[in-house]
Amino acid sequence: MNRLDYMVQVEDLHASPALRARIAALAGEVRRPRRRFRPWMGVCAALAVVVLGGAWLVTNVRMGGNAGGSGHDEASTFLSYAGPIFPLTLEEENGTITAQRNITLDFAPWQREWISNEEEVAAMEGLTEAERQEALEQYNQWFTDGGYYRSYDHILVTDSYTLTNHSDTGQEVTVYYPFAAALEKLSQYRPALTVDGAELDTTLVVGSNGAQYSAGSWEDYQALFSGGDYLATALEPLRDPASIPVIVYEFTDSYGPEGSEEAPNPSIRASMELDYDRTAVLSYGFQGGSYDREAGTMMQDFSIPEPGDSSYGKPRYLLVLGEDVAGLTTGGYAAGGFEADTPALADSGVTVTRYESDLDTMFRTILADALARRMDTQDMMYAALDFETCYRAILDRFYQSGLPENLAQWQGTGALEDFISESFTVDRVSWVSAQITVPAGGSVTVEASFAKAGSFDYACAHTKNRGVYGYDLVTKLGSNLTCTEQTATLEDRGLIEIVRQNFGFDLENGVKTVTLDAETEHYYLEIKRVTE
């Protein structure tokens, strides 16, 4: 295999499973978290390691984002759009306060840093000496030059606002700083706020993801804010899920023979009858479904887990909204799926318990399990997520489906794993907020500091933008704050060349700070890494 085609993954190691798990958890940027591939991405996602100057360069490849989008101004439409940098806003418009804004785009993370194998392994905690030596041997197989160069494709943003109070009384205001990111990336991209250099305790407000599910350009975010109430909606409480009754079928203690040639995928199948106009069924832990609206039947199935599987010993659920299902039966089968000739499986079964509950109780139970499983599989980014934040996002996604009112019109399959995955992985606008005081006749400086991912085209797309990254900002979208001046500063650090822009930066002539026109709603910068 050509080294350029080789993707470094923990699964490729020949170390013991226990050590592979520890390396996965402790190896920093070398660890490759599990990706949720989109079907259209194909082999594009495989580009994770490239050779640069005879040494390995490990990069973070942004697999999220949304494809598509319409053409807009003179900027490119990237296959993976990271969203713009938004301006600060106030909870309520305040005519006595104005702002001067300066935003700095710093490419420091693009600087290559050499990481030796010894240094990487020495930083790992919790290894025995034998495991540490085994890990070093694996790194030496990975990186035969004794280490690797590490760099990133995000930038550091400092968005600074000097707020001036033109009244003769102090003004206590709540500021909101918006940013575009998926919930699972909050630990990487959530902004920190300071006032006059002192860090603020901030509250996270999560926006809805539904209206911008396919955001591919800044105009999609423009449409999202067009109603003027996007933040207000995010601040409103959602309908109380405890008021929504559900009938629960809990599946536990499934058993069956091990997989074999005769039974390649031992599975449990649940069959039931229902009126699709009066009933909706949500599932958790089931892997397939068959739906016949005309006949009024439904089947759901799951593979019988073996010891060591993440779902072993865990309950699975069917949640019934509306009228109860009838005639629920279960049976074991030699394979998953719903073919009529699939052989029945002897010595198999499952315990089914029926009880009544409410949506709040069941969603909290299921979400807790989903988060625990993600952390168990080394997706440590989920450890930083606040439970209530995730819970609201999933409830929002559920209500967007039209349930529980529109049972007759609902066409979804009901897999709660899909609701949860979409809630975690789809980009949305959220805010960090804090209360500050602007003294009478005085000023304070509020700064938002954060990492910002770049927009890009996948390496296999063969577009004009291969190797190009885009970073963009909006001057007033979603903000009620009056800015008397806006400037932008580029800290290029000699690492980039500009391909397209409308900022007015001129690196050759040293023009790295420019004044922005508030009437120009959108500014974009598209760059390539300088070839070394």
Image (tube, helix red, strand yellow):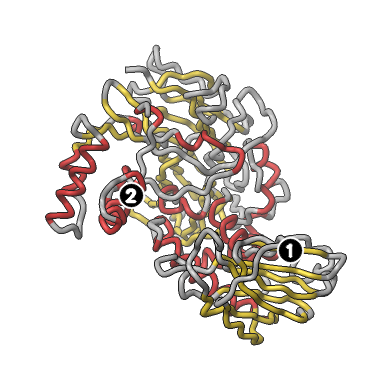
Vertical order, 439 against 256 (above or below):
above
Vertical order, 340 against 520 (above or below):
below
The residue sitting at 73% across, 60% down in the picture is 412
Vertical order, 78 against 225 (above or below):
above
Asked where in the image residue 152 lies, by quadrant, the reply is top left
Q: How many marks?
A: 2
In the rendered structure, the answer to whether residue 126 lies left or right of residue 318 reads: left
Structural crowding at the residue carrying mark 1, measured as other residues with C-alpha within 10 Å and reported as few (<14), some (14–19) or many (≥20): few
In the rendered structure, the answer to whether residue 296 lies left or right of residue 480 reads: right
| Mark linked to residue 190 | none
Residue 448 seen in render: yes
Q: Nearer the viewer, residue 82 or 196?
A: 82
Quadrant (top left/top right/bottom left/bottom right) for the C terminus: top left
Vertical order, 499 against 311 (above or below):
above
Residue designated by label 1: 340
- Type of the residue with mark 1: Ala
> From mark 2 to mark 1, how far is it between C-alphas?
68 Å
Q: Secondary structure at mark 1?
A: loop
The residue sitting at 58% across, 57% down in the picture is 423
In the rendered structure, the answer to whether residue 390 lies left or right of residue 129 reads: right
Q: Secondary structure at mark 2?
A: loop
Could you say where residue 107 lies in the image, as x and y percent from the top left?
Answer: 37, 31
- Type of the residue with mark 2: Gly
Could you say where residue 173 lies in the image, as x and y percent from the top left?
Answer: 51, 58
Residue designated by label 2: 197
Instruction: Residue at the far front: name it.
Output: 262
The residue sitting at 75% across, 69% down in the picture is 298
Could you say where residue 115 lies in the image, as x and y percent from the top left?
Answer: 22, 37
Could you say where residue 351 lies in the image, as x and y percent from the top left?
Answer: 58, 82
Q: Nearer the viewer, residue 339 or 138?
A: 339
